[in-house]
Image: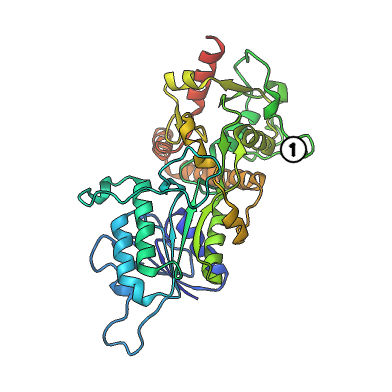
Amino acid sequence: MRLLVLGGTAWLGGEIVTAALASGHEVTCLARGESGRVPTGARFISADRDKPDAYASVLPSTSEPSPERWDAVIDLSRSLDQVRAAVDALETHADAYLFVSSTSAYASQSERNADEDAVTFPDPDPTTPAADVPYGVAKAAAERAVLAAFGPDRSAIVRPGLIGGPGDPTGRSTYWPTRFARAAEEPTRITPAAEEPTRFAPAAEEPAKTAQLTSPSDDERIVPTHAQRPVLVPAVPDLPTALIDVRDLAAFIVSLVERGIRGVFNATSPALPFSEHVAIARQAVNHMGPVIEVDERWLLDNGVSPWAGPRSLPLWIDDRDWWGMNDRDVSRALEAGVQLRPLADTLADILAAERAANSQQSNSDASALTDDTEKTAAAARNTTRAGLSDADEEQLLTSWTTR
């Protein structure tokens, strides 16, 4: 198939292109290219989708005897204006259009187990500048633009929830396995005030396998379990969580295009209680130290944010009216053939990728940076990633256990 990917240089886009190439497809990526390079084997066309001539290079010229045609277009944009311009330019030159939307397109996140027929946001006020249109509103309106141009028989809408896996630039899926890995490898300086809740214990029927962020020598093994560092978690054991591995999402998107499947699909995993996610993350690194549950109100009062961003606790959602976001009906996607790997496999691969990235960064920094500039560069890399720093977690744990 001849596929046109509008994007392809960032994380998910790159995985989609990689999956399409692996299946033997001819892939062209149209993007500005500021997020990185396209995977080897794909054709890259540099274009600014905010410009009126953005699609000129992928459309036939009047001198060509045979118009260039695409078997399918895959669009990842969050800009409503970009999507509207794309469908207008490409409708007569593409057989199908797959739009990567989001579960954020739903107008309400309070209902649990809601399916794809749930109400989405209405179109924004036409006088609102594109940059000011909220993410979910823009995605919902872009869906309607695709359906209006291509119709339901030539389009597919994929609504991912939280995307995770190796290379996650947000830190939302990497925080818990890497946090427990560091805690398992470093001795504690904090005496817990209470025993560890048993709900966070690794599953007894599956022996824990050890994974580490570093490559320890014979003298740098995991510390004894009674001395391992505690890990702070929000006291929300029943919070629903859901995560789709970026590679599974990419494979599903390519599969829909290959098989000509149309429709709207929630693309995430079945909901899993937060306590189970934590238990699986602990098991991945054999963390047997304390898990300290901390009251939500106390966390908020002490400057800890839910969900994402610096000084946050990923996966935590304090507002119960948003708990439906990670508890969506995924029956349609399962029936359409989405293949979801076990969470334990995703977290293990995250740890391996983080270990490799840390090793590569250490080697690079050692040869190119002084100690001061290394610290500055490391701080700059982590300014937007989700999670608590080691220092923040230790300060919070000390304050909580001595309150």
Camera sees residue 47: no
Q: In this view, does 268 lie to the left or right of 79?
A: right
Residue found at x 42% / y 76%: 70
Question: Residue 144: x and y, percent?
Answer: 37, 59
Residue 355 position within the rendered picture, expressed as x and y whole percent measured from the top left? 58, 43
Check disc 1 and report the residue beneath it: 208
- Farthest residue to the top: give it: 403
Colour mapping used in the image: rainbow
Taking 239 as reference, is 84 left or right?
A: left
365 shown above or below 145? above
User: Mark 1 Cα within 10 Å, few/some/many (few <14, many 20+)?
Assistant: some
Of residues 191 and 134, the one drawn nearer to the viewer in this rendering: 134
Residue lying at the far bottom in this picture: please name it. 65
Mark 1 falls on what kind of element? Answer: loop
In the rendered image, residue 131, in percent from the top left (x then y), is placed at 26, 48
Residue 97 horizontal/vertical position (percent): 42, 67
Q: In this view, does 187 lie above or below 271?
A: above
Q: Which of 117 and 21 is in front in this view?
A: 117
User: Does the image show residue 142?
Assistant: yes
Residue, x 59% and y 22% (percent of image)?
293
User: How many numbered marks are there?
Assistant: 1
**Residue for point 53% across, 15% down:** 400
Quadrant for residue 51, please give it: bottom left
Q: Which residue lies furthest to the right in this view?
A: 205
- Three-letter code for the amino acid on which mark 1 is drawn: Ala
Q: Is 294 or 269 nearer to us in this picture?
A: 269
Drawn side of residue 177 relative to residue 373, left or right: right
